[in-house]
């Protein structure tokens, strides 16, 4: 079966750095997405990786290793507004998007 | 209108009733999707449409139907609601022809409670 694993919840301190991991087992791979979802709101796009390596976008970076079926989202200089759920999603060989359950990130002052 | 709108924002529905959730986008995107999101589970695809006039079944299609008469609208109908359909429903769209690597953009969601 297809599976996306992420930690259920993480806590970090304002101003610090946090890494949210995602491992996947899917039938094929055509890219990996990270979305941010604030409580009670819609998911919004953060990043897309299809090749191995690190993609940097401001305070947020996303890393992919296709051979290991692994990605992480790195958030630097954490702000209170970064408190949200972070969703990992993989496009499989049929180009269907398979979603993880999300990681709830709690930022403390 | 800017982006994707959904209606209603929330609804409480008696079991057995028929309900249509509305979704409209003004981005002229080809593909549209309906997901449900339940606590502790990832987003699950109900139905999708790669382009106007075509629809397909997702992971959890039973009890739901969709239509895509034009590019902008993609309504989701529950023919006879059951309590297990209590969930938050998100509509999304993407610029490609669906199921692709294109970024999906989400509407604000409809919170549905079936009693």
Image (tube, rainbow, N blue to C red):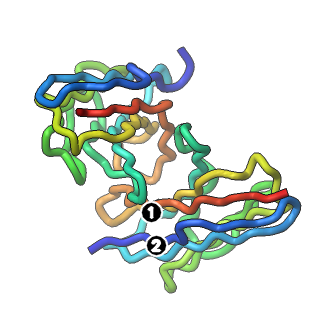
Horizontal side, residue A39 vs residue B45: left or right: right
> Residue A23 at x, y = what percent?
49, 76
Mark 1 and mark 2: Cα distance apart in space: 6 Å
Residue at position x 79%, y 50% in the image:
A80
Residue at x-position 70% and y-position 52%: A83
Direction from residue A24 to residue A72 in the image, left or right: right
Picture residue at 49% right of the left edge, 24% below the top: B27
Instruction: Name the mark on residue A100.
Output: 1
Provide the residue designation for mark 2.
A5
> For the residue labelled by badge 1, is the local secondary structure a helix, a strand or a loop?
loop
| Residue B13 falls in image quadrant | top left
Q: How crowded is mark 2: few (under 14 residues within 10 Å), some or many (20 or more)?
A: some
Q: How crowded is mark 1: few (under 14 residues within 10 Å), some or many (20 or more)?
A: many
Q: Read off the chain for label 2.
A: A
Assess whether mark 2 and mark 1 are in contact (beta carbons under 8 angstroms): yes
Looking at the picture, how far across and down is residue B59, in whole percent?
24, 54
Query: Disc 2 on helix, strand or loop?
Result: strand
Query: Which label is found at residue B62?
Result: none
Residue at the bottom extreme, as displayed = A68
* Residue B29: image location, x then y, percent: 43, 30
Residue B14 is at least partly visible in this image: yes
Q: In this view, does B92 lie above or below A102?
A: above
Q: Position of residue A60 (x, y in %)?
A: 74, 59
Of labels 1 and 2, earlier in sequence is 2
Tell me the residue at 39%/20% (across/down): B7
| Rendered position, A64 above or below A89 | below
View extreme (front): residue: B115
Q: Nearer the viewer, residue B9 or B61?
A: B9
Foreground: A7 or B54?
A7
| Badges 1 and 2, same chain | yes
Residue A53: which quarter of the image?
Answer: bottom right
């Amino acid at each position: 079966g297809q599976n996306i694993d992420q930690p259920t919840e993480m806590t970090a301190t304002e101003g610090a750095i946090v890494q949210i991991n995602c491992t996947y087992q899917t039938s094929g791979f055509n890219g990996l997405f990270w979305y941010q979802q604030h409580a009670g709101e819609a998911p919004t796009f953060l990043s897309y990786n299809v090749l191995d390596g690190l993609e940097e976008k401001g305070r947020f970076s996303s890393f992919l290793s296709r051979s290991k079926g692994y990605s992480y989202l790195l958030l630097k200089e954490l702000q209170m507004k970064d408190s949200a759920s972070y969703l990992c999603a993989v496009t499989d060989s049929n180009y269907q998007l398979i979603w993880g359950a999300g990681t709830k990130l709690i930022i403390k002052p | 209108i800017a982006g994707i709108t959904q209606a209603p924002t929330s609804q409480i529905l008696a079991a057995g009733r028929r309900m249509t959730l509305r979704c409209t986008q003004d981005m002229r995107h080809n593909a549209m999707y309906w997901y449900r999101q339940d606590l502790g589970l990832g987003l699950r695809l109900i139905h999708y449409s790669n382009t106007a006039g075509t629809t397909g079944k997702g992971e959890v299609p039973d009890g739901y139907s969709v239509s895509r008469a034009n590019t902008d609208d993609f309504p989701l109908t529950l023919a006879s609601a059951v309590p297990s359909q209590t969930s938050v429903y998100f509509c999304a769209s993407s610029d490609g022809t669906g199921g692709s690597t294109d970024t999906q953009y989400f509407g604000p969601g409809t919170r549905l409670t079936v009693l």
